[in-house]
Image: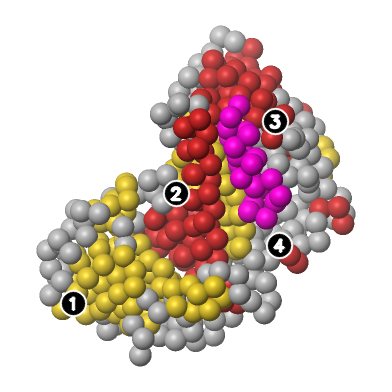
């Protein structure tokens, strides 16, 4: 049987495990907010309408940072509509998703929810229909201590202490023709620079994310980042990357190998940003904020123009299977393997909309298959990421040619080693892990997310059909760890060294 080998050595590390890699995304889209995280009157809702069942699941997932309020939604959002007494908030048309937005949930509710999760906000400002002024006003509202128009309004709204929001996205997908108020790279680069300049004068300690490309298929990919950064390089800390990976029918192997595309995109964006840095003689190096990523059959989505005007419609509520979980696991592995240059990552989205958590209005909340690789990685990836040397048989794919069946990474903290590995192949894969420069391990455990039926899903009526399970059979032989990875599986091997 073909086998794979992984070599690890604590001398060769990528960088620290950045906790912000385990971010998520809450957009006012479909049922992510309304009847997702927020549903006043639900039996599980607290006095503020926050669903406790979703809070519990989000905590269990280990989400560390949450991007909000969009997404395309933010590009025609007026943040002032979502603060202050709920009865006085206006109902508006959201042009991004043709939704009726009641504004019953806004900044204060989001921050209260985040406190329950124990996660950090990644806040986006509207650079579509608005600009410098609305962004600096919002920052004054959230971060300035008091004694000014906007900070005093926050205090009047019951929040004496500033929220102290650190990370801010300068708009969303401004390259996209679908974006309300979309811009050319020149227009956006200038606006991002001026907005950043003003925001830094309100609070010099913030971290700013400039919009990169919406995906790798858009015609301006690469040139967009270069032009934008020529304008705003010295004002920003991150350049964003977005991508969704589609299970195009008939090309399952390429879908399982989606991480190859993410890997290439990360390298492209870093190379482009570093090139601009070199041209500008700027020694600072930007990080990537991969602040929208997930598996999504977007080729089946008919687009927003065909939608009816509705409040909290069922929009792209994808059902995920075991193969989707393996792909999500491989994407997390890729992010960790670039922990030296990817500083933030947000899986999109958290609840109902292409999401690991599903809910029914008035009903239960449950974990989709893709919940599990996220939760296992967030819980076990600790300390430093080690550079993993992989030798594995390959499989043919239409889009990427021959691709190794194994993708893996490892982290170490004190004597706790964790190896994360995806078998993309449809055969069991014997794996040997060679530990160089580490004491011989004394204990090993193996958890897998796999199923004989790789199309298996979790549903409202069978919410635990796919769950992580412990596999027996992993062994220690001197400084070798040995295990067999089930076909199309995400795996965590933990050892004490
Ligand atoms: O997450 C769904 C949508 O995908 C977001 O609103 C947008 O930024 C992206 O195109």
Q: Give the Cα separation between the discs numbered 1 and 3.
A: 57 Å
Q: Can residue 463 be seen in this snapshot?
A: no
Disc 4: CA contacts within 10 A as few (<14), some (14-19) or many (>=20): some
Question: Which residue is disc 1 drawn over?
Answer: 476
Secondary-structure class at tag 3 = helix
Task: Give how far apart the Cα atoms at labels 2 and 4 are.
Answer: 23 Å
Q: What is the count of numbered marks? A: 4
Residue bearing the label numbered 4: 298
Mark in front: 2 vs 3: 3
Q: Nearer the viewer, residue 357 or 123?
A: 123
Comes first in the chain, label 3 or label 4: 3
Looking at the rendering, the stretch of residues picked out in magenta corresponds to 210-231
* Residue 285 shows in this picture: yes
Q: Residues within 10 Å of mark 2 (few under 14, many from 20)?
A: many
Mark 2 and mark 4 residues within 8 Å of each other at the beta carbon:
no
| Residue of label 2 | 21
Instruction: Measure the C-alpha gap from mark 3 to mark 4.
Output: 28 Å
Give left or right: position of 45 versus 176: left
- Identify whether 40 is placed above or below 85: below
Where residue 118 sits in the image (x, y, percent)? 44, 43
Residue at numbered disc 3: 186
Residue at horizontal 50 percent and vertical 51 percent from the top? 266
The answer to whether residue 198 is above or below residue 258 is above
The span from disc 4 to disc 1 (Cα, nearest Å) is: 43 Å
**Residue located at (21% from left, 80% from top):** 475
């Amino acid at each position: 049987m073909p086998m794979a080998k992984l070599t690890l050595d604590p001398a060769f590390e990528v960088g620290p495990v950045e906790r912000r890699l385990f971010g998520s995304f809450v957009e006012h889209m479909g049922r992510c907010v309304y009847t997702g995280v927020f549903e006043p009157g639900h039996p599980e809702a607290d006095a503020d309408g926050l669903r406790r069942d979703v809070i519990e699941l989000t905590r269990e997932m280990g989400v560390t940072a949450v991007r909000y309020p969009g997404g395309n939604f933010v590009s025609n959002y007026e943040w002032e509509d979502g603060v202050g007494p709920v009865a006085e908030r206006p109902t508006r048309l959201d042009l991004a998703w043709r939704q009726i937005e009641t504004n019953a949930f806004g900044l204060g509710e989001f921050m209260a929810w985040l406190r329950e999760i124990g996660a950090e906000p990644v806040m986006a400002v509207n650079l579509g229909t608005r600009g410098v002024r609305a962004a600096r006003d919002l920052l004054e509202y959230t971060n300035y201590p008091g004694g000014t128009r906007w900070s005093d309004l926050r205090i009047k709204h019951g929040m004496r202490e500033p929220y102290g929001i650190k990370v801010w996205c300068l708009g969303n997908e401004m390259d996209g023709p679908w974006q309300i108020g979309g811009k050319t790279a020149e227009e956006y680069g200038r606006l991002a620079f001026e907005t950043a300049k003003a925001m830094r004068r309100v609070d010099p300690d913030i971290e700013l994310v400039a919009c990169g490309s919406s995906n790798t298929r858009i015609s301006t990919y690469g040139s967009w980042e270069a032009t934008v950064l020529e304008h705003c390089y010295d004002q920003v800390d991150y350049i964003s990357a977005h991508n969704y990976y589609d299970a195009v029918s008939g090309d399952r192997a390429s879908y399982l190998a989606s991480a190859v595309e993410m890997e290439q995109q990360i390298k492209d964006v870093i190379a482009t940003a570093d090139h601009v840095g070199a041209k500008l003689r700027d020694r600072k190096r930007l990080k990537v904020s991969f602040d929208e990523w997930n598996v999504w059959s977007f080729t089946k989505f008919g687009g927003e123009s065909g939608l009816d005007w509705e409040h909290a419609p069922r929009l792209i509520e994808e059902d995920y299977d075991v193969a989707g979980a393996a792909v999500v696991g491989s994407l997390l592995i890729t992010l960790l393997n670039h922990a030296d240059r990817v500083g933030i990552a947000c899986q999109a989205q958290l609840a109902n909309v292409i999401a690991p958590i599903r809910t029914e209005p008035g009903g239960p909340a449950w974990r989709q298959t893709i919940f599990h690789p996220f939760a296992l990685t967030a819980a076990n990836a600790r300390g430093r990421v080690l550079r993993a040397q992989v030798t594995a048989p390959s499989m043919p794919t239409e889009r990427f040619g021959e691709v190794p069946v194994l993708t893996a990474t490892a982290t170490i903290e004190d004597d706790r080693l964790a190896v994360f590995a995806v078998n993309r192949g449809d055969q069991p894969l014997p794996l040997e892990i060679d530990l160089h420069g580490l004491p011989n391990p004394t204990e090993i455990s193996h958890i897998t997310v796999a199923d004989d039926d790789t199309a298996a899903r979790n549903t409202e009526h069978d919410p635990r059909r796919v769950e992580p399970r412990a596999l027996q059979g992993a062994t220690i032989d001197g400084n070798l760890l040995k295990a067999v990875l089930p076909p199309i599986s995400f795996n965590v091997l933990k050892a004490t060294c």
